[in-house]
Amino acid sequence: MTAPAPTHAVWDATEVTQSVQDLQHRVALIAGKVTVIRVYVSGTSGPPAGVRGTVTLIRSTTDPGVKVTSVNTIALDPNSTQGLAARRADANLSLNFIVPPALTLEGALSVSSVTLSDALTGAVLPLGATGAGPTVLFRTGPPLRIRVLGLRYTTTNPPGTFTPRDLDFTALVSWLKRAYPVAEVISSHAVIDATATPPFLCNDTNAQLAAIRNLDISVGGDRRTHYIGQVADGGFFLRGCSSGLPVAADPSVVASSPCGSASFGWDFDGTYGDWYGGHELGHTFGRLHPGFCGESADDRQGYPFQSGQLADGPDTFVGFDVGDPALNLPMKARPGVQWHDVMTYCDRQWMSSYTYEGIRRRLAAEDALVAGAPLPADTPVSAAAPLAVAPVAGPPRPEGGRPDERFPKLSVTPAPPPAAEPALRAAGAAPEAEPLVSVVGTVNLTRREGGIRFVNPVTPLAAQPAQPGGAAGPDGEAAGPNGGTQVVLRIRQTDGAPPREIPVPVKLASELGPNDDRTGLVDTVVPVGASPEAIELVVGGQVVDTFRPGGAPPALRAARHASAEAGAFGLALDFDRGPEAGQTFAAQVSTDGGATWQTIGVGLKEPTIQVDRSQFRPGDQVQLRIISTNGFTSTAADIQEIQV
């Protein structure tokens, strides 16, 4: 009996993709990023068969090659072959190969050959000769650095406390690693309490994030880090926004995003905080709205594809999600006509080639910024004034006692001043001749209203990059972000010297419509002089708010464990005197013996804090620093290490 003729096939095309690509490979490939080779074959004769593929990959002409087997099988039916465009639109219709990480290093990679085998028998199938596959080039690129802060809040209607889920954070980081032009996402995460009263706006949360970031950068944090807040939608829905649309590299622009489990009719992975956060972070890289599906038309002239799509037709760009097994997310193709750019308001959002390349270029520009440096461990620090240290008590007494005495006290020691000159020298920054403060406020240019939200002393490390003048803002205007309304910080002095007037830009919120009030942030670092008395926020010639410092900042005497919500540990703080108007404190944590610090609270007034445990690894030794300030001066104290 004669054996049936095998299935014959032809090698139609090959596509090397990471997030979005066309068959000419016009989108840059990032070295080290998860890479998938999609091989398109079609049957020409013989019976239908399930097939698996093997590709041979080489890095040079002398390379013997590495054989890689497809992660899937496809059905070949010579009597029913779909067009190439249809196969590119479905990850199940291409043979997909994950490139080994060692082959995605900087340099060239060639697909030298493809072989097919029957998925059931393993027999090699005839494949028409079509020559070698494509040669592509991997380019090195910087990582994406983000700090994600989940903002916890409490409401009475509906009653409850609402916190972003771990899924909202992990899915955001995963989505960014899959969609953004990066091989690595360097991320950190914490849950903190929102300082504004709900239902707050994204300008309120962005003000809090900006103040936190300024304190982090002031003590040597990496200035290339982007900050984004997540707000759970259980109590109310926060419409997200960024605190500006920088026309040049400026990671100081922060963003806030809602998160939750809604599907919006197309997103069924359990959270929308991934692509929504990707949209708002895109604004921090200067990406504008293309102007489709009800959004402002900020980039209508620049966006190259109709209706906000990833492509104008099925034969060019196709998005591709490499998936994430840890989140049970399979590989998926994102057809260019059905899917839309992440910077639109349309359904089915992914990364277009236009946005991908724009963010890649901006990341490279940001990577050239000075990272900042912590104080070297072997650098001596001048002794601070002595501070009373509370003795460490034994375990809680089983017989109980006064509520404030049931937990052991923790020792408190003075901390070095934040303006440590060795850290400035390490980062290439010169010490300022006079004190600097970070001023963060919210402004409504339309109504000529505003408020100063946070004032904190900082080092020169916190200075922000200047944006070029005359660049188009979110309205496409070249008159500057304040739209002709001058905003000034007026710093009054106690020694009779004339007040200083410092014009400041307003970082307009990213999601403003044509009829919306022009709202945004003042976020700047300014010298305040030798004897500052007050800071006035002046909008359009009118004083709209005044910050007046309190007395000398209170010193921390002792701290003790206190009750806290699930997933956190609490601390009650004992200052040497009660708080007064114009005084607040900030809290920072360190897990490396004080070499680096991250801010977990700013503008705090109640002498208690809750510290989210999820930001630490089990067994971490956590050190806390409490910085009390009147806005112009501050004192700091470190609480003894606590093991998580």
Image (tube, grey):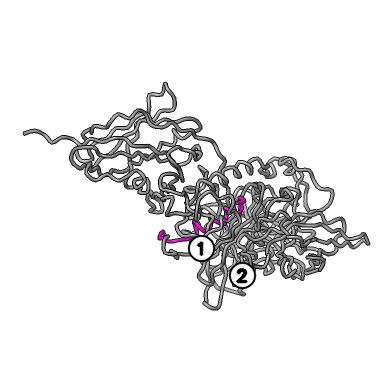
Instruction: Give the numbered dot on residue 99.
Output: none
Residue 391 horizontal/vertical position (percent): 67, 61
- Taking the magenta stretch, the answer to whether it contains residue 280 is yes
* Residue 196: quadrant of the picture: bottom right
Q: Residue at x 47, y 55 (%)?
A: 349
Asked whether 389 or 471 is in front, the reply is 471
Q: Rate crowding at label 2 as few (under 14), some (14 to 19) or many (20 or more) other CA atoms within 10 Å.
A: some
Find disc 1 in the rendering and name its residue. Answer: 259
Kind of residue indicated by mark 2: Phe
Q: What's the magenta region? A: 267-287
Instruction: Give the numbered dot on residue 200.
Output: 2
Residue 21 horizontal/vertical position (percent): 45, 43
Kind of residue indicated by mark 1: Cys
- State yes or no: discs 2 and 1 in contact (Cβ < 8 Å): no
Residue 642 appears left or right of 9: right
Asked whether 546 or 507 is in front, the reply is 507
Residue 362 horizontal/vertical position (percent): 61, 45
Helix, strand or loop under label 1:
strand
Q: Can you say whether 115 is above or below 246 in the image?
A: above
Q: Residue at x 66, y 63 (%)?
A: 559
Residue 351 horizontal/vertical position (percent): 49, 50
Asked whether 606 or 274 is in front, the reply is 274
Residue at the bottom extreme of this rendering:
157
* Residue 236: quadrant of the picture: bottom right
Q: Rate crowding at label 1 as few (under 14), some (14 to 19) or many (20 or more) other CA atoms within 10 Å.
A: many
